[in-house]
Image (cartoon, rainbow, N blue to C red):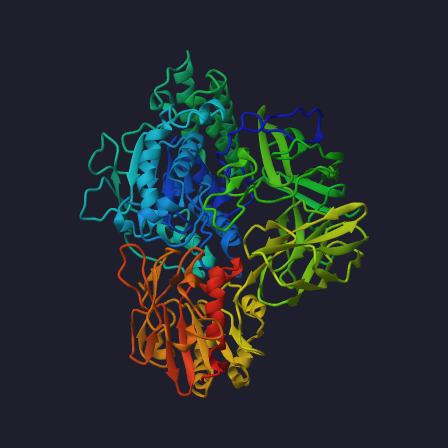
C-alpha cells in the first residue's frame, strides 16, 4: 500500500499521495480509468447499464492461466458484462518466449507487447484487474516435470497466493485441468498449482511474511472450479457463452473473441465468429458442489443486503439496514434508468454512495465487509461519472505553448520529459449533464514516488468547461519510466522486482496523473486521467500517449552482443552508437567508447550537438582488438554533456493500439570470441518473416546480407547470392513469398543454396518445396534446450566445413532445440539429426537437406533465432556451415 503525504491547497495542487481508502492493486483496469476512456461499450447509457449490473452484486471471480491468450474469453465477458461480477485474470507469465507476428521484438520485449495486448483484450472482457507472477515464459514445455524444473514452484505458489490475498475473489476458475490433457507443461503446472494456492491463501501459516510484512490478510475463496472438462465427464456448470447481449449487439463469445484476436503478436488478428450455443464445462473441486449449478455464484448470496452473511461477519448495530438500503437504491436506479437521459439516476446513485460510506465508517478497516464496500465506493463513483457524461483530459505540452481547438492549428507535441525540465499541463473537465457539481478542484498526482514536483496552477473556466493550467517542473531525482520487473540473464526464469508495491501489476504506473474532485449532493467524486502528450502519426493524425520520464540523452548500442572469431591475432569491427536527445533545448557534448586494456578505439571521442528534442544521431567507432584470451569482453558507450554522463538507453516499444513501453538497457556491447569460420566473401539474401535478428547474426559472421523485397523477389537477379534464407514464419505473413516461390526453387535448381527456417502450417511443402513432405498444424518440436542429439549423417559435408561440428556444439542452448518439424518427407531429403524431449519419440524432421538440380534445398527448423541473440557458440558454427554450403570446396 502506498503511504500518503499531506497535500494542502484549497483548489489546485500537485503532490504525491494515495487516494483516500484506496484499494491496493484492486480495480486497476476498470474504475481506475476515466469514464470516457476505453471502449464505446463502456460509455454512455450502454456502459452505465453494465456498471449498474456490477453495483447490484458482490460477486467476484479470478481466472488463472499460464500465458496471454490462454483465457476463456467468452466466459470472462459473460461473467463481467452479463452477470456484473468483478473479474480478475492471473496469467503466470507474459509470453516472453513466443514468436512475434507484428515486429522484431523477442524475449522480454515481446513480453511487454503481450502484456499490453492482454490489457486491450481485457477491455473487451470487462476485466477489473490483471495480474502476473514473476515467472517467465521460457519456451514450449511438453511435460510438467520440465516446467517445475525451470520455474521455482514455491515462488509461483507464493505469487499466486499473494494475488488471491490482494484480490480476494469469491470464486476461482482455473483455465486448465491440471493433467496431461492440458498439453503444455506450463498449462499442467497452473492447473495443478491453482487448487493448492486456493487452499494456502486462507492459511496464515503459509507465506506468513505476506501478512506480517506486507499487510495482507488470509483469504479463502468460497468456490473453486477447473476448466478443460469434457461434456461427457463430471461437470457442475454447463455455461453457454453464445448468449446474445442486446447491450453489446453480439454474443458474449463473439465480443470476447474479438478482444482475444487483438493479441496480434500471436493471432495475427485472426478472429472466428460463432453462431448458436458455445458451451464450456467446469468442474467444482472444493466441497459442497451441487450438480447442475446455474453459474459460478450458485448458492452464494451476492446481494448487498447479504453482505455480512457472505463473509461471516457480525453486522454492527444498524448495519444490516444500511446494507439493505444500498440494495434498494441500486434497484431504484435500475427502475429509473433512462437511456435518453442517464443523468436522471445520479441523485439515486449519490445516495447509494453516501449510504455505502456510512456503512464503511461503521466497520473495522481490515474487515472483509470494508473491502467489499470500498469496491462499491469505486463502482458508485464510476457509475455517477458515466451517468453525467464527464469528459476529462490532461494534456502535457511544452512550456509557453497553448492548445487550440482549430483543426488547422499546429498540434503541440511533447516527447518524454527529463529531470529539471518544465512543461505545461492543461487539465480540462466538462459535465455533459444538467446535474450541478460543487467544490470542484484539480490535483496532479505522482503515483508511487515521494519526490515532489513543483507546479504553479492557474484556474480555467470557459463555456461550461472547467480546468486548470499547471506549469510543472520535474525534480532532478525523478525516476525514469521503466518496467518494475527485470532479469539479469536470459537463463533466469523469474523476474526480479524493483518496487514491491507494484508486484503483479501489468506495468509501472503513469508518470503523472490528473485528478478532478467534485461533490454531487454532498458526496465527493474523484475522476482520474493519466497526463498524456500528443505524438505525431502523420498522415493519420496524432495519438495521445501517457507522459514518460527519460534521461536527457539516451545512448543505444545495437546489438548488445556480437561475436568475433577468437583465432585472429588482430581483429576489428565497427560499433554504431545512437544518441537520442530528450533535452528540451539545444545541448552539446562528447561521445566516447570505453574498451578493455589493449584494445584500440578510433576516434577517441566524437562531439555532438542537438538543437531540439527528438533528434537522433548515429556515430561509428572502429574497434581493433588483440587475440582474445577470455570468453566475453565489454565495451561501454558514454555521452557527456553539461557536467553529466549518460551510459544507458532504451528502446521505445511502439505498436498500434498499444501503450508505449520503454525498455532500458546499459549502453554496452558484450563481445564474445567464438571459434567460428565462414566461407570468404559470402553474399546472402534474406527474406524476412516475423521478428528475428538472424540478418544481424549473419552479418557478424562476416557475410554480406541483403534484405529481399517483394520487387526483388519478382524480378531481381537471385543468382548473385551464395545463399538465400527464408526467415522464420515468413510463409505465414508474406503473400509475395508464396507468389514468387517458384523463382526461389529455380534459384536452388540452378546451383543456389536455399535455406528455409522454421515455418508454421501456412507453409505447405507439397506445394512450396521441391519434394513432398508434411508439416501439419500438430508438427512436433523439442522444447528441452538440453535434449539429446544424434547426428544421423555425420559425414555429410555440412558437418565438415568450414567448422568441424561435434557434439560440443549442442551444449549451452537457450529455450529449445527447435520447432515445427517435418513429420514425413520424400526420400530425396536427407535428415541430418535426431533429437527428442523426455518421453518423446525420436524426431528426425528438424533439419533436412535435399539436392535440387545442382543446388541445395534445406528445411532448418532448429531454433537458431533463439540462440544467436545470446551468442551461443554451437548454433553460430552450425549456421555458418549451412550458409557456406554453396561455396564449399568439394562442391
Q: Position of residue 705 (x, y in %)?
A: 57, 74
Q: Nearer the viewer, residue 111 or 295?
A: 111
Q: Position of residue 87 (x, y in %)?
A: 41, 38
Q: Would you identify the image quadrant in which residue 418 lies?
A: top right
Q: Is residue 729 left or right of residue 522?
A: left
Residue at image position (39%, 53%) is 257
- Count of labels in the image: 0
Is residue 271 visible to us here? yes
Q: Position of residue 307 (x, y in %)?
A: 38, 23
Q: Nearer the viewer, residue 167 or 351?
A: 167
Q: Quadrant of the C terminus?
A: bottom left
Q: Quadrant of the N terminus?
A: top right
Is residue 101 visible to us here? no
Residue at image position (54%, 54%) is 657
Q: Is residue 854 left or right of residue 641?
A: left
Residue found at the far top of this picture: 317
Q: Is residue 123 left or right of residue 472?
A: left
Amino acid at each position: 500500500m502506498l503511504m500518503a503525504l499531506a497535500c494542502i491547497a484549497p483548489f489546485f495542487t500537485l503532490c504525491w499521495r494515495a487516494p483516500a481508502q484506496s484499494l491496493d492493486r484492486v480495480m486497476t483496469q476498470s474504475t481506475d480509468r476515466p469514464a470516457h476512456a476505453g471502449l464505446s461499450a463502456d460509455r454512455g447509457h450502454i456502459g452505465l447499464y453494465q456498471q449498474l449490473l456490477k453495483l447490484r452484486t458482490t460477486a467476484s471471480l479470478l481466472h488463472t492461466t499460464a500465458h496471454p491468450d490462454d483465457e476463456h474469453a467468452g466466459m470472462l465477458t459473460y461473467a463481467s458484462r452479463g452477470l456484473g461480477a468483478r473479474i480478475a485474470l492471473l496469467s503466470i507469465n507474459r509470453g516472453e518466449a513466443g514468436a512475434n507476428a507484428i515486429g522484431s521484438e523477442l524475449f522480454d520485449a515481446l513480453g511487454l507487447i503481450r502484456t499490453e495486448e492482454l490489457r486491450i483484450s481485457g477491455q473487451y472482457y470487462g476485466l477489473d484487474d490483471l495480474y502476473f507472477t514473476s515467472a517467465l515464459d521460457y519456451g514450449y514445455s511438453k511435460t510438467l516435470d520440465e516446467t517445475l524444473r525451470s520455474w521455482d514452484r514455491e515462488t509461483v505458489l507464493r505469487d499466486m497466493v499473494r494475488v488471491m490475498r490482494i484480490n480476494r475473489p469469491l470464486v476461482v476458475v482455473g483455465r486448465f485441468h491440471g493433467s496431461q490433457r492440458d498439453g503444455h507443461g506450463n498449462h499442467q503446472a497452473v492447473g495443478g498449482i491453482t487448487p493448492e494456492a486456493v487452499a494456502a491463501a486462507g492459511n496464515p501459516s503459509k507465506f506468513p511474511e505476506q501478512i506480517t510484512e506486507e499487510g495482507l490478510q488470509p483469504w479463502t475463496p468460497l468456490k473453486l472450479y477447473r476448466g478443460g472438462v469434457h461434456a461427457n465427464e463430471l461437470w457442475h456448470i454447463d455455461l453457454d457463452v453464445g448468449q446474445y447481449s442486446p447491450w453489446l449487439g453480439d454474443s458474449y463469445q463473439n465480443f470476447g473473441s474479438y478482444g482475444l484476436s487483438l493479441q496480434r503478436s500471436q493471432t495475427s488478428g485472426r478472429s472466428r465468429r460463432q453462431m448458436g450455443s458455445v458451451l464450456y464445462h467446469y468442474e467444482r473441486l472444493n466441497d459442497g458442489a451441487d450438480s447442475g449449478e446455474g453459474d459460478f455464484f450458485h448458492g452464494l448470496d451476492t446481494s448487498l443486503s447479504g453482505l455480512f452473511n457472505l463473509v461471516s461477519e457480525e453486522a454492527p448495530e444498524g448495519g444490516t439496514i444500511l446494507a439493505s438500503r444500498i440494495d434498494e437504491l441500486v434497484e431504484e436506479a435500475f427502475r429509473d434508468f433512462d437511456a435518453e437521459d442517464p443523468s436522471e439516476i445520479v441523485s439515486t446513485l449519490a445516495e447509494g454512495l453516501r449510504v455505502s460510506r456510512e456503512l464503511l465508517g461503521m466497520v473495522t478497516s481490515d474487515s472483509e465487509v470494508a473491502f467489499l464496500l470500498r469496491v462499491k465506493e469505486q463502482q458508485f463513483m464510476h457509475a455517477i461519472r458515466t451517468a453525467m457524461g464527464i469528459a476529462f483530459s490532461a494534456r502535457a505540452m511544452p512550456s509557453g505553448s497553448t492548445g487550440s481547438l482549430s483543426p488547422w492549428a499546429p498540434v503541440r507535441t511533447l516527447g518524454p520529459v527529463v529531470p529539471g525540465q518544465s512543461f505545461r499541463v492543461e487539465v480540462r473537465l466538462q459535465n455533459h449533464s444538467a446535474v450541478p457539481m460543487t467544490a470542484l478542484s484539480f490535483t496532479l498526482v505522482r503515483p508511487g514516488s515521494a519526490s515532489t514536483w513543483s507546479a504553479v496552477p492557474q484556474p480555467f473556466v470557459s463555456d461550461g468547461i472547467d480546468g486548470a493550467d499547471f506549469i510543472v517542473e520535474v525534480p532532478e531525482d525523478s525516476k525514469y519510466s521503466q518496467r518494475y520487473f527485470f532479469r539479469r540473464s536470459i537463463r533466469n526464469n523469474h523476474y526480479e522486482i524493483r518496487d514491491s508495491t507494484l508486484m503483479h501489476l501489468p506495468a509501472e504506473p503513469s508518470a503523472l496523473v490528473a485528478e478532478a474532485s467534485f461533490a454531487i449532493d454532498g458526496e465527493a467524486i474523484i475522476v482520474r486521467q493519466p497526463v498524456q502528450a500528443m505524438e505525431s502519426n502523420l498522415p493519420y493524425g496524432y495519438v495521445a500517449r501517457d507522459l514518460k520520464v527519460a534521461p536527457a540523452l539516451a545512448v543505444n548500442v545495437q546489438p548488445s552482443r556480437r561475436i568475433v572469431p577468437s583465432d585472429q591475432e588482430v581483429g576489428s569491427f565497427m560499433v554504431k552508437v545512437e544518441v537520442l536527445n530528450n533535452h528540451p533545448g539545444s545541448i552539446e557534448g562528447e561521445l566516447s567508447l570505453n574498451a578493455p586494456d589493449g584494445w584500440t578505439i578510433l576516434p577517441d571521442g566524437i562531439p555532438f550537438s542537438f538543437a531540439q528534442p527528438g533528434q537522433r544521431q548515429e556515430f561509428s567507432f572502429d574497434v581493433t582488438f588483440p587475440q582474445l584470451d577470455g570468453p566475453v569482453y565489454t565495451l561501454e558507450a558514454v555521452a557527456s554533456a553539461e557536467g553529466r554522463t549518460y551510459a544507458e538507453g532504451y528502446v521505445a516499444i511502439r505498436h498500434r493500439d498499444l501503450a508505449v513501453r520503454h525498455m532500458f538497457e546499459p549502453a554496452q556491447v558484450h563481445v564474445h570470441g567464438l571459434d567460428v569460420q565462414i566461407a570468404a566473401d559470402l553474399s546472402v539474401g534474406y527474406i524476412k518473416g516475423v521478428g528475428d535478428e538472424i540478418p544481424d547474426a549473419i552479418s557478424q559472421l562476416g557475410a554480406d546480407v541483403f534484405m529481399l523485397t517483394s520487387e526483388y523477389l519478382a524480378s531481381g537477379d537471385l543468382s548473385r547470392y551464395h545463399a538465400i534464407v527464408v526467415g522464420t514464419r515468413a510463409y505465414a505473413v508474406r503473400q509475395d513469398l508464396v507468389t514468387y516461390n517458384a523463382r526461389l526453387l529455380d534459384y536452388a535448381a540452378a546451383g543456389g543454396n536455399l535455406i528455409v527456417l522454421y515455418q508454421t502450417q501456412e507453409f505447405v511443402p507439397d506445394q512450396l518445396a521441391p519434394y513432398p513432405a508434411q508439416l501439419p498444424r500438430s508438427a512436433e518440436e523439442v522444447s528441452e534446450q538440453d535434449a539429446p542429439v544424434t547426428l544421423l549423417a555425420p559425414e555429410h559435408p555440412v558437418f565438415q566445413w568450414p567448422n568441424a561440428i561435434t557434439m560440443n556444439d549442442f551444449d549451452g542452448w537457450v529455450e529449445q532445440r527447435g520447432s515445427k518439424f517435418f513429420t514425413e518427407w520424400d526420400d530425396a531429403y536427407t535428415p541430418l539429426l535426431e533429437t527428442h524431449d523426455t518421453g518423446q519419440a525420436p524426431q528426425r524432421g528438424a533439419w533436412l537437406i535435399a539436392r535440387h538440380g545442382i543446388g541445395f534445398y534445406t528445411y532448418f527448423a532448429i531454433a537458431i533465432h533463439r540462440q544467436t541473440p545470446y551468442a551461443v557458440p554451437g548454433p553460430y558454427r552450425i549456421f555458418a556451415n549451412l550458409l557456406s554450403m554453396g561455396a564449399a570446396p568439394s562442391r
